[in-house]
Amino acid sequence: MTFNPNADVSDNTAQRRGGGRRTGMVVGGGAVGLGAIVVALVAILTNGQVDLSGIVGTGGQPQQQETTAATGEFADCKTGADANANDDCRLAAASLLLDDFWAANMDGYVKPTEVVYSGTTESACGTASNQMGPFYCPPDQSVYVDPSFFVIMRQQFGASAGNLAQLYVVGHEYGHHVQNLIGVMEKYPNNGTGADSNSVRTELQADCFAGGWIKNITQSKDKNGVPYMKEPTEAQIKDALNAAAAVGDNNIQSRSGYVNPDTWTHGSSEQRQNWFWTGYTQGINACDTFDGPL
């Protein structure tokens, strides 16, 4: 998936942060997203156990932070060519397309804050760190993405993590923001782990929303009428599906020699691919993961 080189992406509203003083990773506070798989991987590699029950929720009180972070805007992210050349810019530019899509497909859409960070930064859900990975924080309605997560996907999860796969990741987190806005998180609160848990159903719906957005990604245009994106190739779609499979609970757990569906929080590789594909082929109206079998 590539941006049209002459597309104007300069009006993105993403924030750039980085360089914070690390005080440790906070798991909880209502954070939702792919970041939980990084926590799980840390547990696997250290032969430890991490309680992920707090990683999915409807929010909570902001936690006191000691980290500091420099902030800035993406003044150097002006064109589609910039987005094609730089991960940070690509993630920032994606916010334009996601906001366009959801504003057109739901009443009362409110833009989240997208934070592209490195190292550590503050969030209302705790310390965002490069160990945490991408997540959505309901209390501050913000999406947090550290681009180094894509290196982890390649090195530890066996994913290629190409351009469209990266957009799938940020699209997934925006899906959680939409769930927050439409009341999904309140209606289906965290009820623990397991293959049929609300946690898994919440994550799979976000995958489905991401697929629905990507299917329509070429419809968004800049202020000059230039489409932001070119049509995705078959290889790029396969790359996004590969990313979805890589972050399946069974794929992650298999690296430690066991697979236990009772501890799942995100769904299997097959489920994640299937729900992404459901959104891609049938649209976001087909994304009710809470009604019936998965």
Image (spheres, rainbow, N blue to C red):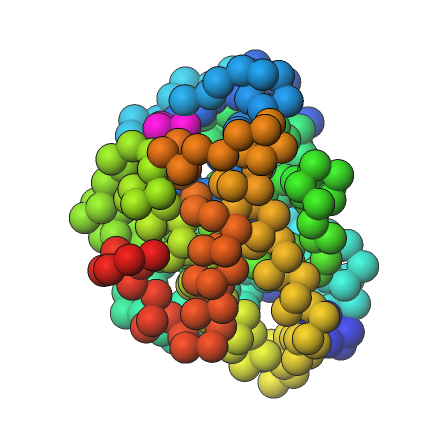
Quarter of the picture holding the N terminus: bottom right
Residue drawn at (40%, 54%), measured in percent from left and top?
204
Where's residue 246, x and y in %? 61, 48
| Residue 116 on image: x %, y % | 61, 44
Front one among 50 and 75: 50
In the image as oriented, which residue stretches furthest toward the left?
A: 187
* Residue in front for this viewpoint, 38 or 255: 255
Query: As drawn, is 69 to the left or to the right of 216?
Result: right
Left or right placement of residue 242 versus residue 290 in this view: right
Q: Residue at x 44, y 62 (%)?
A: 275
Q: Main secondary structure of the magenta part?
A: loop
Q: Is 278 placed left or right of 21 in the picture?
A: left
Q: Which residue does the image show at 73% across and 53% down from the upper left?
A: 160
Residue situated in front as seen by the camera: 4 or 216: 216
**Left or right of residue 148, residue 39 in this image:** left
Q: Identify the residue shown where x is 34% and y is 65%.
A: 287
In the image, the segment drawn in magenta is 52-56
Instruction: Name the residue nearer the viewer: 253 or 122.
Output: 253
Q: Is residue 55 magenta?
A: yes
Q: Is residue 140 visible?
A: no
Location of residue 157 (image quadrant): top right
- 11 above or below 126? below
Residue 29 picture location, percent across and down = 36, 28
- Compared with residue 30, is residue 228 higher up or lower down, i.e. above or below? below
Looking at the rendering, in which quadrant would you find the C terminus?
A: bottom left
Q: Is residue 157 magenta?
A: no
Q: Is residue 22 visible?
A: yes
List x then y, in percent, for residue 24.
55, 16
Whether residue 154 is situated above or below residue 224 in the rendered picture: above
User: Considering only vertical position in the picture, is 208 above or below 30?
Assistant: below
